Every structure is written in C-alpha cells, then in structure tokens.
Image (cartoon, rainbow, N blue to C red):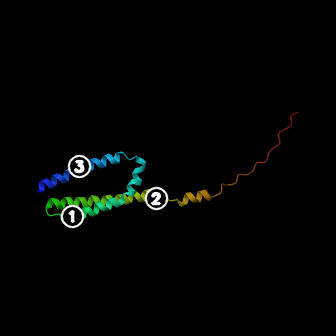
Amino acid sequence: MSPGQTLALGAFIFALAVFVGFLLISKVPTMLHTPLMSGTNFIHGIVLVGALTVAGAANDTLGYIIAIAAVLLGTLNVVGGWVVTDRMLQMFRRRPAADARKTETPPATPATPATPAAPDH
C-alpha cells in the first residue's frame, strides 16, 4: 500500500470512529456520563499504549507529529478520566461537619407551665 493510500485509509477509519462515537455518546443519558467515564478508564489506557506503539513505529516527520499528538491526547484522556472518577467518588464520602451536626442534640426549650383557663363568671 502506498503512503497516500495508508493515509486515506487512516483518515477514513478516524472519521468513522468519530461518527460512531458521537452517535453512541449522544444516546447515553446525562446521568450515566460520569459512571460511564469512570468505568472506561482502562480503555483510555489502551489508547495510550496504542499511541506509544505507533510512536515507536513512526518513520517520518508527519508520523512523529501524529504520534506526539496521539500520546498527548491519550494522556489527557487517562488523567481526565481519573479526575472525573475521583470527583464522582468524593460525592459519596461523608463530610465530618455534617456528621457532627447530625449527632448533636437540639437545645432543650424551656417548658412553659400550662396556665389554667380563667373561670367564666
């Protein structure tokens, strides 16, 4: 395969992946985006390993530029996924101040003596 055909095939696969990815993500309800992101961190790691493999096989300047961009974007994906997961997990942690307020007893209100009703004369 010539370099031009390889580039055209790569561009076609990339465009197809962008299209299919957009369709899939747009169908996911917004409540599931964060758990889905945290569950797919390993996929971002695989993307990064693939980018490093491509970087090792690069032979020309264009290949090096694409490989550096792929490694950079893959790294951003991995770090971003872990940041989102950490923020999501922080939502489920108890706050010490909130626990202290729950265990405090409310201040006692002074009891007001019941006053007898005045007799009707």
Label 1 Cα neighbours within 10 Å, binned few <14 / some 14-19 / many ≥20: some
Q: Earlier in the sequence, mark 2 or mark 1?
A: 1
Q: Dot 1 corresponds to which residue? A: 55
Q: Quadrant of the N terminus?
A: bottom left
Q: Quadrant of the C terminus?
A: top right
Question: The residue tagged with tag 1: helix, strand or loop?
Answer: helix
Q: Dot 2 corresponds to which residue? A: 90
Residue sitting at 40 percent across and 53 percent down? Answer: 34
User: In the image, what residue type sits under mark 2?
Assistant: Gln
Q: Quadrant of residue 42?
A: bottom left
Residue sitting at 24 percent across and 64 percent down? Answer: 52
Question: CB under 8 Å between callouts 2 and 1?
Answer: no
Residue sitting at 28 percent across and 62 percent down? Answer: 48
Question: The residue tagged with tag 2: helix, strand or loop?
Answer: helix
Q: CA distance from mark 2 to mark 3?
A: 36 Å
Q: Nearer the viewer, mark 2 or mark 3?
A: 3
Q: Residue furthest top?
A: 121
Q: Earlier in the sequence, mark 3 or mark 1?
A: 3
Question: The residue tagged with tag 3: helix, strand or loop?
Answer: helix
Question: CB under 8 Å between callouts 2 and 3?
Answer: no
User: In the image, what residue type sits under mark 1?
Assistant: Ala
Q: Dot 3 corresponds to which residue? A: 15
